[in-house]
Structures are given as C-alpha cells and as structure tokens.
Image: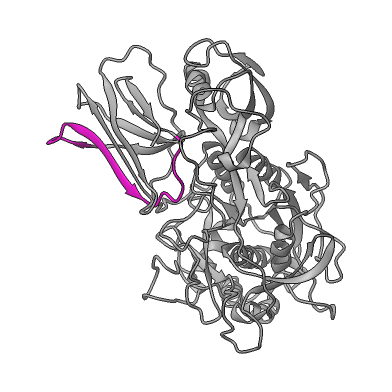
Amino acid sequence: MRLMPPLIAASIALTACSPTEGDPSADGALASPPEQARGWHSRRVLIGHGELPARVELQAGPAAGITIERDRHWPGISASRYVVQGDATIGDVMRSVRLLGDKVTYVEPDFLRHAVVEDPLRARQWNMDTVGAESAWTWSMGAGVVVAVIDTGVATGGPDGLNAIAPGGYDFVNDDDDPHDDHGHGTHVAGTIAQVSGNGVGVVGLAPGASILPIKVLDANGSGYISDIVSGIELARQQGADVINMSLGSNRGSTSEQLAMQAAYDAGIFVAAAAGNAGTRGCLYPARYTTAVAVGATDFSNDKAPYSNWGPCIELVAPGGRTTVDQDGDGFRDGILQETLINGAWVYRNWQGTSMATPHVAAAAALLMASGADRAQTLSYLQQSALDLGSPGEDDTFGFGLIQPADALAAWDADQGGVAPPPDSAETGDSGTGVTPPPGDTDPPPGDTDPPPGDTDPSCTLSITQAKYNSRRGELTVQAITDDGSWNATLYVDGVSQGAMAWVTKKARYEYKERGWNDQPSLVEVVSECGASDSAIP
C-alpha cells in the first residue's frame, strides 16, 4: 500500500523446486499424501469460478476424464478448493480446468508456505523501548480491538499470558476448533501484540488491551498451504477482526490469496505482513500485495537487520531483532523476547526475523484503531509519525520509517480536538468498507487475476524458445516467437500473471527477464491475445 494524506487532515520462502518429481507440469501421477518439499499440494487446485458444480469431470485437455471434487468453498471471493480424483499432474489438471471456459476465472496450485523466523536466543525487550510502548499507553492500550494472528496457532495458559482470546478461532490444519500452537511461532507473535502487561510476570506486549483471534494455518513444522491461509483470512473477516497479522510468506503469489486479501481490505481490516528474511530486494507474498502493509526489520541501532528484505514494497519497519550481536551491552543477544510454548514447556525465547517485526506494526495499528481511527487513517498516521531512517523521506530500505506509535496517537488525538477516549475505553472506528486501494509498487509486477484464455482455435502461432532460471542471480528469462507480433502476449508463472511481455521488434520475439525470483518457478506459460499459447519448465 502507498498512502500519504497529511496528518493534520488525517525463513519464509517456499521450498525451491526443480523440474523433477512433483513438478506441476511433470509427467506421471503425483503421490498422495503430498511431500512438503515439493512446494505445493499434489492433489489439490484452487479455482476461481462462477457457477461450477461441486463435482466436475474434465472433458478436454491433458487431464480429460479426470474428476475434481470441491471440499472447501469461499463464497466471499467466489473461489473453491478442489481435490483431484485420479492420476494426473497438477499442471495437466490446471490446463484442462482452463478449458472449462467462462465458468473459471483462474486456477492455481495449492502452494506451501512456511513461517518467517530465525533461530531463537534469549535477550531483553529493548524493542519496546525503541517503539515507546509505555508512552503509547498514555493514549491507548488497544482495548476493544481484535487482532487475528494467522500463524501456527496460539497456546494459552502460560504464566504471563495474553490479555484476551477472542471467540471464533479455528485450526485449518487439523480442521477443528482448537487452534493450539504446536510450534511456538504464533504464540510468540501474539505475545508481542497482547502479552499481559503490569502483572509483575515476564514481559509486555505493545497492545496489551487487545484481544487475539487465533487462526492456525501452519503446522508443527511451521508450514502450511495457501488454501488454509485463504480460509484463515476469510474467517478473520467474517469474525470481524480489525487487524490481521501475517508473519508468514513465500515468493509465489496466489490469486485466491490476493482476492481474500482484497476482501479483507474492502472490509476495513489493517493487514500487516512480513517482508521476508532473505536479505534481498523485494517482498514475499502476502506482503507484496498492495492490500497489505509490508514490514521490514531493524536492529537495536535502528539499522536494517541484515536478513530483512527491502525494496519499494516496504511500507514501515519495526524491531525484528538480531541474535548474533549484543549492541546494547546487557549481556544478552538482541533478539525479540516473548513467552511461548515449546515442546509442552512455557519459556521465554528470543527470536529474530521480519516475523517478529510485523506484530509490532499490527499492535501499533490496534492502538490507533482503539482510539477511533479507521484502517486508512491508521496507516496514514503510522506513516507520517514514523522515525525517518536512511535517505530523507520514503526509501526502499525503511519505507516511511520506524514506527513511533506514541507520536501517531498524539497526532491523532490533536487532530480530533484532544478528545480521544482514554485507555481501556476506546471504541473501534469506521471500518472503511469500500475504500479503493491506492496503487502500490511491487517487484516483480503483481499478479493479474485474469486467467489465460482457453481458445482452442488460435489465429496465430506461438512457441517458447527459452525458459531459463538462474538460481545464483534469482533471474527468470523467458523468450517466445510468434508469426504475428501485432498481438500482446501475457506471461504466467505458476499460474500468476506477470503482465504483458515486451515485444522486441529487431529480434521478432517476446522477452521477459527479471530478477527477484528466490525460488525456481515450476511452470511458465505464454498466452497470446490471438488464442495461441505454449508452456515450459524453466
């Protein structure tokens, strides 16, 4: 998101896959149950559709005769999860699904996600000093705000504990209503947001008056599928969450997820998402979507943490920790310390990562929304009050800067005539439903929700001549030739559009060459407006 109205007015990455066993376009049947190393579920596809039966027998294309059955539906975004019945690769199923015509708006694999986290070490809460927690509490504690933590779940009953658990949480990994954390990541994240404060025990959270809605979409290994994440976003919206924290991601976009994020945005929900821990240019998804607030990480010295991703997608930064140093000289490594449950034992753990930075921003949003700000106002005040780091003004390393929630709250209160409600009595403000998102800067280009056409009688020919992935540079190169260059051609990578390819008149071919691909794509497709198409494995 990119929004700047004036105040006075207002590691996680998908497992890299090679074109071998499990590739969505490879020959042969995919085994079940799925192996997470593939990077997607071997028997499921996500389909955006209109009137589509719960059971569909594919009639054309490479998976003709294969049946797919719906087992999960998201009416809010007109999409469903379908399970493949029979032996067919996901790539072949996707090609046949596209031939269903106007009934289908898109189809994509059910990609795998992992939690964004670094190795844990103990340290102290210097991070709460950095963001001025106690000063912010003179304005707001976050009371009345519900923050959905879409993660590995949230464990309850610890000695320090969380302020409140909102009803309606769910475990989409095990399909039950007990979103218990069997990893530790989600509980740690929730603690940064709403750990009980002032109880004489342990540590504090930045918005200790907020309630946590626990939604489990990642398993005990910190991994989960897009379909569960989409279900989590939809549940958060349906349960009336004000803020969503997503300390997870990958470099593969998903149309289903993008639509769910848009629905959350349209409902007035503030979504904070981790930029990623590769230390490279460009944010992971879902942080890369313009409907999310992408969060980078800083260390004790307010420098960019070495692991933090950067680029024009970065909106704000917050303390993410750095467990290899002791810059404050207190005898502990400078991680982010919170209470969590590890192997059945309650402990205080120091972790680092953009996963740890993101809940600071989610908590800061909760403080403002508890004071009456809506989603757009919350983002604006956080942007304008942020501590400017790096180059003057907004930049690719720190975005608008390091969050300073106390300054944001003071400015909000002043602009409301000094009558903002006191802590613990604030009510949430207008949801902002229907606000059109401002244009955002993404790298690479955002995914287009328009599907490749299923025209079987093209008026021109097209052939991919090169599809190459350079893992050292994270660079994808695709070239294609056609007998009629007057048509535009769109490149799809793992089912997500990268926009129109460049036409090089001198060489009489389409070209695409971009860096920032941290994982090897599984399948590339070039689709001409004339109806011709071709696909290849990089």
Res. 430 image quadrant? bottom right
Q: Position of residue 46 (x, y in %)?
A: 58, 31
Count the marks.
Answer: 0
Residue at the image position 56 percent from the left and 51 percent from the top: 249
Residue at the image position 56 percent from the left and 24 percent from the top: 49
Residue farthest to the bottom, as pictured: 329
Of 300 and 288, nearer the camera is 300
406 up-or-down from 76: above or below: below
Residue at the image position 38 percent from the left and 46 percent from the top: 445
Residue 364 as seen in the image, left or right of residue 13:
right
Q: Where the C terminus falls, by quadrant? A: top left
Residue at the image position 79 percent from the left and 49 percent from the top: 179
Q: Position of residue 13 (x, y in %)?
A: 54, 51
Res. 347 image quadrant? bottom right
Magenta-colored stretch includes residue 508: yes
Q: Is residue 32 visible?
A: yes
Q: Position of residue 384 (x, y in %)?
A: 48, 71
Q: How is the image coloured?
A: one colour
Res. 184 image quadrant? bottom right
Q: Is residue 426 visible?
A: no
Q: Position of residue 160 (x, y in %)?
A: 83, 71
Of 426 and 135, nearer the camera is 135
Of 191 and 429, nearer the camera is 191
Residue 268 as seen in the image, left or right of residue 164:
left
Please report the bounds of the magenta region as a residue range: 503-522
533 up-or-down from 165: above or below: above
Magenta-colored stretch includes residue 442: no
Residue farthest to the front, as pictured: 20
Residue farthest to the left, as pictured: 506
155 up-or-down from 52: above or below: below
